[in-house]
Image (cartoon, grey):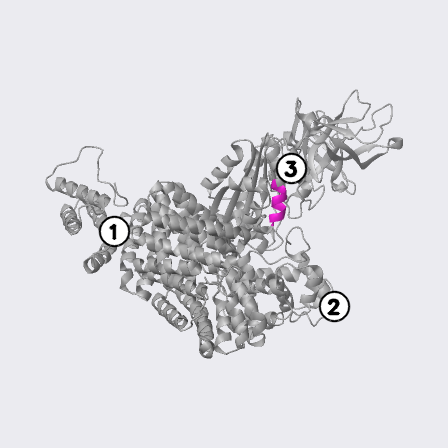
């Protein structure tokens, strides 16, 4: 129901109605004013206020005016939400204004009616059909001109006339979209409300988030994407692509926007919505509790529906797509899903029905990476954030310093990090403390100010802080569950029940809750700030977590462990807390720790707790075997731990039967393979086979599994012929798998063996046979995964193998299609269980980069390389000894493909990582360091730093000379560095002698190589040599052909 206190009585040439838009700004009908320059305005509970006419239009489309009062008409009034009708269905409306009643008494009351949007097609005037039977005689609507027309709490128009011929049953109204089309009108609105007015689809108001920005109540909420405190900058290419996707073509289309937390996905969607709303598109940010119905299929305007956190809204999204797919062809309707990754939820959505599957099959996918893809310099983005956040800080009544603090020393990874640093620099410009500490200090003041009433006023800050920590640690829970958990919170649990209930309600109102469902409280956001609070408080007061150990159910505990694992990267002291928890309840926590590790991208804290279980013998053998059965075979974080666990189980079986010991050795060999210890794994497999040789009736299937394992290991160790022999033996043994005992497991074993055998065949040059075996493996696993979705990662494995063989055979298009299918499954698996499947996702992305490079599809290549860099960065953080070199490789690809700040940032990161490689893993990685220096130098040239670039090229050449001299490798990078140096001398210093020396060195390197090696580098070296000779002979090249700059090959 609209606020009736905003209705105003306007007196000038005549008497009419109005609406208070801002404390001093009033909207009315122009004809009420006549030629008067001033008017008097009354509100139901206010005194008359004199107003000046500051805008007025009375023409074919317009009959409206804006009045500016000499003082506040209504203080502290919120901006209205503006609406427009976007369907063909009549909508219920409410008209608020002042009309004459009995005895000519003028009063304010609501009038109900219906508005048919199709009536506005010809004249841009709405026609209101009012409910009830109007009286005969004079119009009963005298005084209603200028009254506000509302539809579901959105202002859709201004009443202006009683239509003749309808016996007072029809009123005419100027639509809101007509008013907002006038630049002067919009400018006055912006000036007096502080916001840009945006039209929202009125029929969907109860199904959508408000388009108007969130009004922050605390410093943390200044960072909320809905607050839009900082103006939108950068991401130009992405926004242009999304805008084109929305505007081009009719019908229903689906797209997906993914990116890490804090990357700015939600803000991009809101900015897209603002752009489209300005073009008369209907934009619906779908509310979590909205039920899609036929109204979505009845739109007459182009529509964009945005579904944020789509990974947790599969059922709702599937229902929406089902409704939209049945709509008649016509205007464009776009659905944009926002998620962190295209995970298992995407497959569930595709399986929701044929309509969803068809839309998903043709969906576009955009991905947001770090600040390197922002399109503006991070320092400029920081300065913009400081300027805009200063206004937000002032609006909260906080002091704003004349000069903000310094920019962050460490380059921020996300837009959110930039904004957090900027806000902290305003709140404590000279404190020198972490941004999180500064923000939390001010957030604590918000907690105190919101808890001044009894019975909360007697609680200390520590109790309030612990309550916020618990809500953030556990996540949203229903009201009854919230009350139960607060009873466990230190400093809150010992309070009377009335106080605990008040704390629960205080938490409910403190931060926005997830829409829909029965969540009683929200968490402190943004996530990095909430995680930092959890980490620091739990480390200082471990009982916050320890008292919850036996109170949380499985999912709640896994979520809490995930929050702690992320918090451990931001705060110290958490390992001791989790170790203490494990010692208290090892049997309860061990399986939950395993579950959390599989879903965590930052599992170090969780693995440390699991180590305590083995080191201190906290579980009996039976429970250890149960844990081993829960262990994923592919686990980066648990590689060493799983080997230790399996070795303990092997040792326990020393007195067991040969067959059971062979089975344990098979399991141990699998863990050794995952750890990259192939020689040990091969020896372990040999021991297991030797045990079976002494068992006359040993099952063929177990021998087949061991032979398949041996085949895989032989191929990994560069012995493909032996791998083929053992693989074929394995297939023969597996053919005897007992049909009555889980035949699908036997089929999976055959498919795995076929997949591994194909690599051996390819290694022997038998590529056609390798392709055939790989296709057999794909067919078997496709059939299996149809019955057992948990086997989809195995299908992705076989698809990846097939794609590699297709690539090797030169069929790039087929390789691309197969790789993309594998990638879809692997994104799903990695999103759900990053620890287990992130490595496989990285491998497929690396392979995709190679395919796209061969197809010369640069935009797709760059997108794949950026995604691969993000994945490799995560892996390198968890296991640098295994993944840091691959991380450097993909950074070099990104640096080569990009320009400007993004190229330099990738190269700088590559140099830092390569230095760490050489320091920690030896001189074998010097080649990567030299290549990283060369990429850094190349990126510096177009940024206006040729002298700095030359010095870096010199370092690159020094490193690469040593590598080439000692190993004969890295000739291509050395040639590029030498040529760049030579051209620098020719271009910038005219030092021909120095250029001649470097060119001669490049020719000497070429002389040591086969004539067909590195043709591009050879051609560049010969061209540089020719230019040097011309310079030595005093021959000037023809005009227009200067030596190319040293940043890139000519």
Determine if the magenta segment contains residue 642: no
How many labels sit on residues?
3
According to the image, label 3 marks what residue?
Answer: 296
According to the image, label 2 marks what residue?
Answer: 497
Residue located farthest toward the right when viewing the structure as drawn: 103
- The x and y percentages for residue 74 are 72, 43
Which quadrant would the C terminus be assigned to in this image?
Answer: top left
How far apart marks 1 and 2 lie (CA) works out to 71 Å
Q: Nearer the viewer, mark 1 or mark 2?
A: 1
Q: Residue at x 59, y 47 (%)?
A: 226
Read off the magenta span.
Answer: 313-321
Residue located farthest toward the top when viewing the structure as drawn: 165
Q: Nearer the viewer, mark 3 or mark 2?
A: 3
Q: Secondary structure at mark 2?
A: helix
- The x and y percentages for residue 960 are 23, 56
How far apart marks 3 and 2 lie (CA) works out to 46 Å
- How packed mark 1 is, by other alpha carbons closer than 10 Å (few <14, some 14-19, many 20 or more), is many
- How packed mark 3 is, by other alpha carbons closer than 10 Å (few <14, some 14-19, many 20 or more), is some
Kindly report the secondary structure that dominates the magenta region of the rendered protein: helix
> Is residue 195 toward the left or the right of residue 341 in the image?
right
Which of the numbered marks, if any, corresponds to residue 973?
Answer: 1
Image vertical order of residue 1044 relative to residue 786, above or below: above
> Is residue 597 toward the left or the right of residue 588 in the image?
left
Q: Secondary structure at mark 3?
A: helix
Marked residue nearer the N-terminal end (1 or 2): 2
> Is residue 624 toward the left or the right of residue 883 in the image?
right
Marked residue nearer the N-terminal end (3 or 2): 3
How far apart marks 1 and 3 lie (CA) works out to 57 Å
**Residue 98, quarter of the rendered image:** top right
Regarding residue 906, the answer to whether it shows in the image is yes
- The x and y percentages for residue 22 are 67, 41
Decide which of 181, 780 is in the foreground and name it.
780
């Amino acid at each position: 129901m609209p606020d009736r206190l905003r209705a105003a009585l306007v007196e000038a040439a005549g008497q009419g109605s109005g609406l208070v838009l801002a404390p001093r700004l009033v909207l009315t009908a122009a004809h009420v004013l006549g030629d008067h320059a001033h008017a008097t305005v009354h509100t139901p509970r206010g005194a008359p206020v004199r107003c000046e006419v500051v805008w007025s239009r009375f023409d074919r489309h317009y009959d409206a005016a804006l009045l500016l009062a000499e003082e506040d008409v209504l203080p502290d009034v919120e901006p209205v939400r503006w609406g427009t009708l976007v369907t063909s269905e009549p909508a219920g409306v409410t008209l608020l204004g002042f009309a004459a009643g009995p005895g000519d008494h003028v009063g304010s009351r609501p009038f109900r009616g219906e508005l048919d949007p199709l009536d506005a097609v010809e004249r841009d005037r709405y026609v209101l059909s009012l409910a009830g039977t109007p009286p005969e005689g004079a119009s009963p609507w005298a005084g209603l001109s200028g009254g506000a027309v509302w539809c579901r709490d959105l202002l859709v128009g201004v009443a202006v006339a009683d239509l003749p011929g309808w016996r007072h049953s029809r009123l005419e109204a100027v639509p809101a979209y007509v008013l907002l089309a006038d630049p002067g009108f919009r400018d006055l609105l912006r000036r007096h409300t502080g916001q840009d007015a945006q039209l929202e689809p009125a029929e969907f108001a109860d199904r959508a988030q408000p388009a108007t920005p969130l009004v922050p109540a605390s410093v943390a909420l200044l960072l909320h994407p809905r607050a839009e405190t900082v103006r939108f900058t950068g991401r130009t290419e992405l926004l242009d692509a999304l805008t084109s996707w929305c505007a081009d073509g009719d019908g229903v289309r689906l797209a997906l926007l993914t990116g890490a937390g804090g990357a700015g996905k939600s803000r991009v969607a809101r900015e897209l919505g603002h752009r489209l709303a300005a073009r008369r598109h209907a934009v619906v940010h779908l509310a979590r509790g909205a039920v899609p119905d036929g109204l979505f299929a009845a739109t007459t305007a182009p529509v964009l529906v945005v579904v944020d956190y789509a990974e947790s809204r599969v059922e709702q999204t599937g229902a929406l797509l089902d409704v939209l797919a049945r709509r008649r062809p016509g205007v464009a309707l776009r659905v944009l899903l926002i998620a962190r990754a295209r995970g298992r939820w995407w497959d569930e959505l595709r399986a929701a029905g044929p309509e969803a599957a068809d839309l998903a099959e043709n969906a576009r996918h955009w991905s947001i990476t770090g600040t390197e893809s922002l399109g503006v310099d991070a320092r400029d983005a920081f300065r913009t954030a400081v300027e805009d956040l200063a206004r937000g800080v002032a609006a909260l009544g906080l002091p704003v310093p004349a000069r903000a603090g310094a920019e962050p020393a460490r380059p921020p990874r996300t837009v959110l990090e930039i904004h957090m640093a900027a806000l902290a620099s305003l709140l404590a410009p000279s404190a020198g403390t972490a941004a999180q500490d500064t923000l939390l200090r001010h957030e604590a003041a918000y907690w105190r100010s919101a808890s001044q009433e009894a019975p909360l006023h007697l609680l200390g800050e520590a109790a309030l802080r612990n309550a916020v920590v618990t809500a953030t640690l556990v996540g949203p829970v229903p009201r009854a569950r919230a009350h139960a958990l607060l009873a466990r919170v230190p400093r809150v649990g010992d309070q009377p029940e009335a106080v605990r209930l008040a704390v629960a309600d205080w938490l409910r109102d403190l931060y926005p809750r997830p829409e829909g469902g029965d969540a009683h409280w929200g968490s402190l956001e943004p996530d990095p700030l909430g995680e930092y609070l959890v980490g620091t408080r739990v480390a200082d007061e471990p009982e916050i977590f320890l008292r919850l150990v036996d109170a949380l159910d499985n999912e709640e505990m896994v979520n809490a462990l995930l929050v702690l694992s992320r918090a451990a990267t931001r705060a110290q002291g958490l390992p001791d807390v989790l170790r203490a928890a494990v010692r208290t309840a090892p049997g309860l926590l061990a399986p939950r720790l395993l579950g959390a590790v599989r879903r965590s991208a930052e599992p170090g804290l969780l693995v440390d707790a699991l180590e305590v279980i083995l080191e201190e013998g906290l579980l009996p053998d039976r429970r250890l075997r149960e844990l081993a059965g829960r262990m994923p075979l592919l686990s980066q974080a648990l590689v060493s731990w799983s080997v230790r666990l399996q070795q303990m189980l092997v040792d326990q079986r020393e007195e067991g039967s040969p067959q059971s010991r062979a089975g344990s050795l098979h399991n141990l060999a699998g863990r050794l393979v995952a750890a990259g210890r192939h020689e040990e794994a091969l020896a372990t497999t040999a021991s297991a086979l030797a045990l079976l040789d002494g068992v006359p009736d040993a099952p063929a299937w177990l021998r087949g599994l061991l032979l398949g394992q041996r085949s895989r290991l032989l191929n990994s160790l560069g012995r493909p012929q032996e791998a083929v022999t053992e693989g074929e033996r394995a297939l023969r043994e597996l053919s005897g798998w007992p049909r009555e005992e889980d035949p699908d497991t036997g089929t999976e074993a055959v498919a795995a063996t076929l997949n591994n055998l194909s690599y051996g065949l390819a290694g022997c040059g038998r590529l056609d046979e390798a392709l055939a075996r790989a296709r057999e493996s794909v067919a078997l696993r496709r059939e299996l995964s149809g019955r057992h979705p948990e086997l989809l990662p195995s299908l992705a494995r076989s698809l990846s193998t097939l794609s590699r063989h297709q690539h090797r055979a030169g069929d790039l298009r087929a390789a691309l299609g197969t790789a993309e299918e594998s990638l879809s499954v692997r994104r799903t698996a990695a999103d759900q269980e990053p620890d287990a499947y992130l490595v496989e996702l990285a491998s497929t992305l690396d392979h995709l980069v190679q395919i796209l490079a061969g197809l010369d599809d640069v935009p797709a290549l760059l997108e794949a390389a950026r995604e691969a860099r993000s994945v490799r960065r995560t892996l390198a953080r968890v296991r640098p000894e295994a993944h840091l070199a691959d991380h450097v490789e993909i950074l070099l690809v990104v640096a080569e493909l990009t320009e400007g700040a993004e190229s330099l940032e990738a190269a700088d990161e590559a140099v830092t990582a390569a230095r760490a490689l050489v320091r920690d893993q030896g001189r074998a990685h010097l080649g990567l360091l030299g290549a990283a220096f060369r990429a850094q130098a190349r990126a510096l040239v177009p940024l206006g730093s040729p002298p700095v670039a030359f010095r870096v090229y010199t370092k690159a050449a020094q490193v690469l000379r040593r590598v080439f001299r000692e190993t004969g490798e890295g000739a291509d990078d050395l040639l590029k560095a030498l040529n760049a140096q030579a051209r620098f001398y020719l271009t910038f210093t005219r030092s021909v002698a120095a250029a001649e020396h470097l060119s001669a060195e490049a020719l000497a390197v070429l002389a040591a190589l086969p004539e067909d090696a590195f043709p591009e580098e050879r051609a560049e070296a010969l061209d540089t040599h020719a230019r040097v000779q011309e310079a030595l002979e005093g021959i000037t090249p023809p005009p227009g052909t200067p030596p190319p700059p040293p940043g890139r090959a000519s």
